[in-house]
Amino acid sequence: MFETLSGKLSGVFDGLAKRGALSEADVTEAMREVRLAMLDADVALPVVKDFVNKVRERAVGHEVLDSISPGQAVAKIVNDALIDALGGAGAVPLNLNAAPPVPILMVGLQGSGKTTTSGKIARRLAQRERKKVLLASLDTQRPAAQLQLAQLAERAGVASLPIIAGQTPVQIAERAMDTGRREGYDIVILDTAGRLSIDEALMDEVRAIRAATDPAETLLVVDAMTGQDAVNTAKAFNEAVGVTGVVMTRMDGDARGGAALSMRAITGAPIKLTGSGEKLDALEEFHPERVAGRILGLGDIAGLVEKAADTLDHEESEKLALKMMQGKFDLDDYAAQIRQINKMGSISGILGMLPGMGKLKDALGDKELDTSVLKRHQAIISSMTRKERRTPSIIKASRKKRIAAGSGTTVQEINRLLKQYDAMASMMKRFSKLGVKGLMRQGLSALMPNGGRPPGGGGRPPFG
């Protein structure tokens, strides 16, 4: 989402890094480029002015102009200013400090992803916080909106308020809270109706629901793809009904990121959660310091570790780690690794979370990394017998022809897979011989044939 802004800011820092000590004119020129980059990313003008002024004040100080690495010093100042603009370091959790059932009011325009987000939050609270959650649709405007939320609740594994035709939104909200109290629910999520545009009728309805339920959280759901319009929507809702937090949806889109940078400054309400897909588990806490790191190409290792912890099968990973330690690795293990990689989602999305990978992503352009080879490898392994997967050395010409026919691939592709497998299996054996201490002493190159040195003192390394 922030790729354009990230690329332009990286260009500014690359230019500064090539210079020696910076003059005030160098800083002024760099800040002009930063200002243009932020405006191009659809950041609100008042936010841009405030941001650039803060950075300039610190950057023209002696600690930067006389710094050994002035380019890095300016990058650090921009990073700190980005974190401030996004709401300060650390995620802001949902406020659940109220007597149960805690009401959470979901507001926003139609099409912003409000109903899906309600389901995502319900699932998150039920699974991570072990809360008993009730979902209630107050949307009497859109046909089948209440039925949609009931289906989402079923998928999320939480309860939904039974539908009674003819009730007003306020009556439904009161019934939801009454049901929550009587049936011992911890949290009641109230999904209000949206409109195609902000109107007084919508605001009056939300005010009446808020007065009837006194919510602990009023979460505004905005679509990050709408750019500056998302900021205008947030401002209008905040002035009319008061917003305690923002949830930004479609953060995986190609929007320019300006809405996220403007949201805190314009509304005063923190971005609490972000959505990046239709799946019910595609919801994350918003960490300003991690987003700033990704904008500046510093990566988001903490986010990647959390993503891995949430998606990977720990039992399978432990089994594989044990096999690696013992120097055992067969094609079943390789297939398991492919499944784990696929669970992590888009490869380019993972790359974006690794430090210094921004330029590689730029080189790829709009293309997603080609992962079709992994799918073909899965198909090939699936076409093998159990014995072949456990002992790949028995796979000779006739078996290769049968496997190729069964998987819709060629004998050449099977040969390439077996060659890759042999290289991985050899590496595992060397790992088991070295052990962790030997690996720490000799480094990763010790896993390569001949310790990573070209055979015979010249030529290409075998893995090159």
Image (cartoon, rainbow, N blue to C red):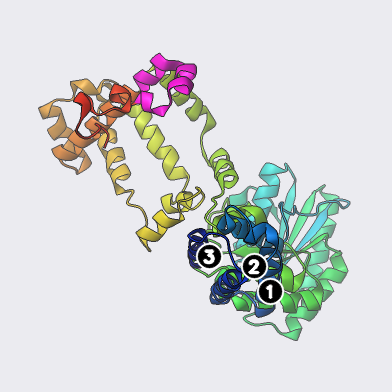
Q: Secondary structure at mark 3?
A: helix
Other-residue count near label 2 (Cα within 10 Å), few / some / many at <14 / 14–19 / ≥20: many
Residue drawn at the location 82% of the way across and 54% of the way down: 102
Q: Which residues are magenta?
A: 428-447
Residue 352 covered by magenta stretch: no
Please report contact status of discs 1 and 3: CB closer than 8 Å, yes or no: no
Other-residue count near label 3 (Cα within 10 Å), few / some / many at <14 / 14–19 / ≥20: many
Image coordinates for residue 432, horizontal then vertical, percent = 40, 17
Q: Disc 3 marks which residue?
A: 9
- Choose the circle earlier in sequence order: 1 or 2: 1
Image coordinates for residue 27, horizontal then vertical, percent = 60, 69
Q: Magenta segment, principal secondary structure?
A: helix
Q: Secondary structure at mark 2?
A: helix
Please report contact status of discs 1 and 2: CB closer than 8 Å, yes or no: yes
Q: Does residue 386 sit above or below 91 in this rendering?
A: above
Label 2 sits on what residue type? Answer: Leu
Q: Secondary structure at mark 1?
A: helix
Residue drawn at the location 67% of the way across and 66% of the way down: 60
Residue drawn at the location 76% of the way across and 85% of the way down: 200
Marks 1 and 3: which is nearer the front?
3
Q: Calculate the distance from the C-alpha at mark 1 to the C-alpha at mark 3.
A: 17 Å
Q: Disc 1 marks which residue?
A: 47
Q: Nearer the viewer, residue 279 or 10?
A: 10
In the rendered image, which quarter contains the C terminus? top left
Mark number displayed over residue 261? 2
Image coordinates for residue 456, horizontal then vertical, percent = 19, 24
